[in-house]
Image (cartoon, rainbow, N blue to C red):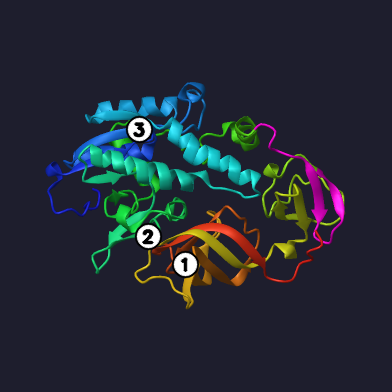
Amino acid sequence: MLNSLDLPKPPHETRVVVAMSGGVDSSVVAALLKREGYDVVGVTLQLYDHGAAVHRKGACCAGQDIHDARRVAETIGIPHYVLDYEDRFREEVIERFAESYLSGETPIPCVECNRSIKFRDLLATARDLGADLLATGHYVASRRLPNGRRALFRAADPERDQSYFLYATTAEQLEILRFPLGERDKSETRAFARELGLSVADKADSQDICFVPQGRYSDVIERLKPGAIRPGDIVHVDGRVLGRHEGIVHYTVGQRRGLKLATGEPLYVVRLDADAARVVVGPRAALATKTIIVADLNWLGDRPLGPEPIEAAVRVRSTRPPQPALLRALPGGAEVELLAPEDGVSPGQACVFYDSDGPRARVLGGGTIARTAAAAPVSQAA
């Protein structure tokens, strides 16, 4: 059984819109809520040209997924709606993705999709449908605190935890969002799907960037911004020109492979200079970052973040564990001082704050990495 959805009304008087992506996770959420007696309505978002992606394995929110979500809705006996969000998805997510890469950043489109499409626009649609709650299949936990507010926590299954991608969820949104799988692991979810006879029980998980065929994001950028990808120099941090590149969009901070430089020493991408179309490389030591400036801050702590530092644990990549840091408020953002340097911190990625480095830590917020400062002096000749 799922945990209570934490509303005073009984299930049969509670309408829940479930964001059904066509995958096993959201399908299980819809099925279990229906079995518990909730008034469930399934909604699937059409986010891009599903006709071109209908047979592509690993596609998300495209043709095959819409078909799968519809089949699940029919199986469990709930109404199901498909909403055409292609235009807003292109403007809010895909266009920003391209612009971010061209500016020398490494963006995370899933964060923007959750922020602007799912937890802003879809929440508004849920309210229009008379829903009390919006539920999703994300692996993140939401619990009510003693002060009455709801808070966001890392999922019980650390291998599936998606809190890094959901840090931008606001306190207001948390009051009507529910994440029923946050206390479960993936094996339980698939077992539930088989028990409930869902056709998607063994369906493969979708890829991270749903709109990028075969992982070639440069093709997407070239299509959206023809001629914007410029070749340029690959430059060592000491000022030496080591070679040429076909566009900074092909590189990310911390990258070592694919540089095609015969220098006899291991080199890494240290930074990307979009204005000069330069890829700056250097030794691993040049990657060490001590200070991070975060923009577009979303703060979920109990007390406002101020100029006095507070202790926290931060993640600078989704695949890395939280590390100890000090946080301070800045106008329009925050400063993060890492207690131990991190390598390969890239502008455009998220820096997410937690109250500890534990597996069920509370999410205190986060923001977009705007710029960084090296842990040790690095030549600025480049």
Read off the residue under disc 2: 153
Q: Earlier in the sequence, mark 2 or mark 3?
A: 3
Badge 3 crowding class, 10 Å Cα cut-off, few under 14, some 14 to 19, many 20 or more, is: many
Badge 2 crowding class, 10 Å Cα cut-off, few under 14, some 14 to 19, many 20 or more, is: many
| Magenta stretch encompasses residue 247 | no
Relative to 225, say whether 282 is above or below. below
Q: Which residues are magenta?
A: 226-244
Three-letter code, disc 1 = Asp
Q: Give the image location of residue 120, x and y in percent.
A: 36, 45
Three-letter code, disc 2 = Phe
The circle on residue 357 is 1
| Magenta stretch encompasses residue 237 | yes
Q: Nearer the viewer, residue 373 or 360?
A: 373
Relative to 381, say whether 136 is above or below. above
Three-letter code, disc 3 = Thr
Residue in the image at 42% along x and 45% along y? 116
Read off the residue under disc 3: 44
Q: Give the image location of residue 189, x and y in percent.
A: 35, 43
